[in-house]
Amino acid sequence: MNIEEKLLSINPYSRPGIKLTSVKQLVVHWVGNANSSAIANRNYFESLKDKHVYASSQYIVGLNGEIIRCIPENEVAYHAGNGTVNRNSIGIENCHPGWDGKFSDATYNSLVELCADICRRYGLNVNNIIRHYDVTGKVCPKYYVENQSAWIQFKNDVASRLGQASVAVEEVKGSDEIVRRYENGSTREIVYSDTNCSIKLGSLSPYEKCDCFGVFNNRAMVRYQVGSTGNYKIGFCEWLGGVK
């Protein structure tokens, strides 16, 4: 794996020079600018010191699989929209040829290799790999938010590279994907961003029903509506009794 180091200038907006507290998670993103290159996105981050905009990531993976390191792994990047997560994670932006957000094969393969390498060095597993969506609900990386099976496949590909157990899904026939129903019990149920229950995304009301995509590491993966907004989030519940 070849990584090209093109570090951003130290500045308050894209490379503050603050040391990470720890590395507990990898956060995967899309650049949100179809067919743009890794170097163009790196240069965009560099320009933010003049625009007074906070954004950056430690890595950018390009359309041809090239990897640029913008910020050292031991420094904070502004990528997750959450200060705690920024201080405990490494952000990886990924280029994409189209507006559907699907990564090219070259980008995908480099991302798998990079994630496996980082996990190996910090003693992490695939449960420590999350999407920007899992932190804030932002649709990022778009394709892997809208296609849950593709996200699960990605994590399994990283697990395979690491020699770890794959992400297991209890399969139940749905219309076009693996799906069950989740019926909450008589008390409010917290919904978390990952199976380690490290970040609270929201909660389910007593007896609320929603979609369930299966059980991962003894956590139920659910898709639930956010109030009356018409928006949805995906997260994990500790209580498995609600899986129907």
Image (spheres, rainbow, N blue to C red):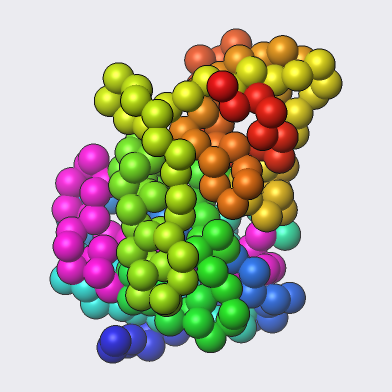
Query: Which image quarter is the C terminus in?
Result: top right
Task: Answer with left or right where residue 75 lies relative to residue 22.
Answer: left
Name the residue rendered at 46%, 71% in the picture.
164
Task: Answer with left or right where residue 3 lies relative to residue 218.
Answer: left
Find residue 78 and report its image quarter: bottom right
Name the residue rendered at 52%, 20% in the picture.
181
Q: Can residue 83 be seen in this snapshot?
A: no
Q: Nearer the viewer, residue 162 or 138?
A: 162
Whether residue 68 is in magenta: the answer is: no
Name the residue rendered at 69%, 80% in the picture.
19
Name the residue rendered at 64%, 69% in the picture.
24
Query: Which image quarter is the N terminus in?
Result: bottom left
Q: Can residue 169 be seen in this snapshot?
A: yes
Name the spot of residue 31 as percent of width and height, x first: 35, 55
Q: Is residue 4 above or below residue 46?
A: below
Q: Is residue 74 above or below residue 34?
A: below
Q: Nearer the viewer, residue 39 or 29?
A: 29
Whether residue 90 is in magenta: the answer is: yes
The magenta stretch is 85-110
